[in-house]
Image (cartoon, grey):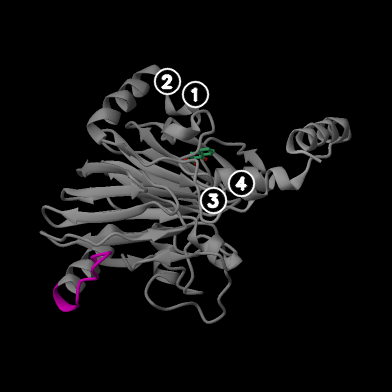
């Protein structure tokens, strides 16, 4: 049979089977099982100078109470309309103004907060409030009641990271509103940190948040101090500078089952080598300025980053980081899920 006839026969076959919801694998196999990751996401950078005026305008346009959560979503430019910064993760910048309340609710999506600007807002989880300070990493475990408030004198802004696209993928999302705007405070501030955060655990550990860390807040001061000391005491990693991962102290695993979080220090003058990993990552710049160079094939993105900027590096795009002055970066990704599946990879050899 000649090729044209063969193609015509095949096209007729596909058309005949289509009404029965059948389609031939051999036409899509290469796309289903790519030789290597081929993310539809693109690298992107949100400078705080660009974003802040829109946040403040949002502050005039709607109250936290009316909005429920007053957030500007950081959408991947290649995934507009999907409320996603990568295929698996959601990110947004949330604003709360003095005296406001973001009402109590709970959902199966896990959330992290990374404080970007301002002090004196608080979040309440499981009857315990945590006051927010810049650089603090705070967790809202899956299915826990949470509300936010502010006793600050100015605006407070934090980065929200949630596993929303993952739960959407699994069709496993549940949500419920609280009966009161703010939950009852039943524990003094710092209770969980004393109970679980002093490199010690209660004798009969109760895993109050299931697979999620029992610590709600990982204060910046402590993490920063550790990085500072390590940057003086140990060899600087050629790719990462000094990078630590946050842990669930009861398991040694990631603080949330779906999201890993990291803090790293790039010492002044650091010029990192390029590496790539299968977990796309969202970065928040805490201190200092630097350059993030992201590339894939022939294409390169150069982000000159400053404090309070956010940027995203998709899966398997290579990243190299350099710093003009001591630079601190927070980041998060879906690595624990990939590791549970045994598929996480990295390449640090270039
Ligand atoms: C949410 O509950 C918060 O509690 C922030 O602050 C962002 C995005 C989608 C769905 C729920 C919060 C959210 C969210």
Looking at the image, do the residues carrying marks 4 and 3 touch, with CB atoms under 8 Å apart?
no
- CA gap, disc 1 and disc 2: 6 Å
Q: Give the range drawn in magenta.
A: 232-241
- The residue tagged 2 is 62
Circle 3 SS class? loop
Depth check: give the residue in front, 206 or 343. 343
Q: Residues within 10 Å of mark 4 (few under 14, many from 20)?
A: few
| Disc with the residue nearer the chain's start (4 vs 2) | 4
Circle 2 SS class? loop
Looking at the image, do the residues carrying marks 4 and 2 touch, with CB atoms under 8 Å apart?
no
Asked whether mark 1 lies closer than 8 Å to ligand 1, one says no
Residue in the image at 24% along x and 55% along y: 321
Residue 211 in magenta stretch: no
Q: Residues within 10 Å of mark 3 (few under 14, many from 20)?
A: many
Give the label, 4 or 1, closer to the camera: 4
Looking at the image, do the residues carrying marks 3 and 1 touch, with CB atoms under 8 Å apart?
no
- The residue tagged 3 is 110
Circle 1 SS class? helix
| Disc with the residue nearer the chain's start (4 vs 1) | 4
């Amino acid at each position: 049979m000649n090729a044209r006839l063969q193609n015509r026969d095949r096209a007729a076959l596909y058309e005949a089977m289509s009404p029965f919801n059948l389609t031939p694998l051999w036409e899509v196999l290469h796309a289903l099982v790519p030789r290597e990751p081929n993310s539809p996401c693109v690298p992107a950078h949100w400078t705080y100078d660009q974003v802040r005026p829109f946040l403040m305008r949002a502050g005039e346009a709607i109250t936290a109470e009316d909005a429920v959560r007053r957030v500007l979503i950081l959408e991947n430019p290649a995934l507009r309309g999907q409320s996603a910064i990568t295929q698996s993760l959601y990110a947004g910048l949330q604003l709360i103004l003095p005296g406001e309340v973001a009402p109590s609710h709970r959902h199966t999506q896990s959330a992290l907060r990374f404080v970007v600007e301002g002090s004196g807002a608080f979040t309440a989880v499981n009857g315990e409030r945590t006051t927010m300070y810049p650089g603090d990493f705070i967790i809202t475990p899956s299915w826990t009641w949470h509300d936010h408030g502010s006793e600050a004198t100015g605006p407070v802004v934090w980065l929200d990271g949630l596993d929303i696209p993952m739960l959407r993928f699994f069709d496993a999302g549940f949500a419920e509103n609280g009966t009161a705007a703010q939950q009852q405070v039943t524990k003094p501030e710092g209770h969980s940190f004393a109970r679980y955060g002093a490199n010690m655990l209660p004798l009969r550990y109760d895993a109050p948040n299931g697979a999620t860390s029992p610590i709600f807040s990982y204060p910046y001061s402590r993490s920063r101090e550790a990085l500072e000391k390590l940057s003086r005491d140990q060899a600087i990693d050629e790719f990462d500078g000094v990078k630590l991962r946050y842990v669930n102290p009861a398991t040694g695993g990631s603080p949330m089952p779906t999201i890993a979080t990291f803090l790293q220090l790039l010492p002044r003058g650091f010029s990192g080598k390029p590496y790539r990993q299968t977990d796309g990552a969202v970065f928040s710049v805490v201190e200092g300025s630097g350059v993030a160079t992201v590339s894939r094939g022939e294409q390169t993105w150069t982000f000159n980053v400053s404090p309070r900027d956010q940027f995203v590096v998709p899966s398997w795009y290579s990243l190299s980081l350099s710093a003009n002055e001591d630079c601190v970066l927070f980041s998060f990704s879906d690595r624990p899920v990939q590791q549970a599946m045994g598929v996480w990879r990295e390449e640090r050899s270039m």
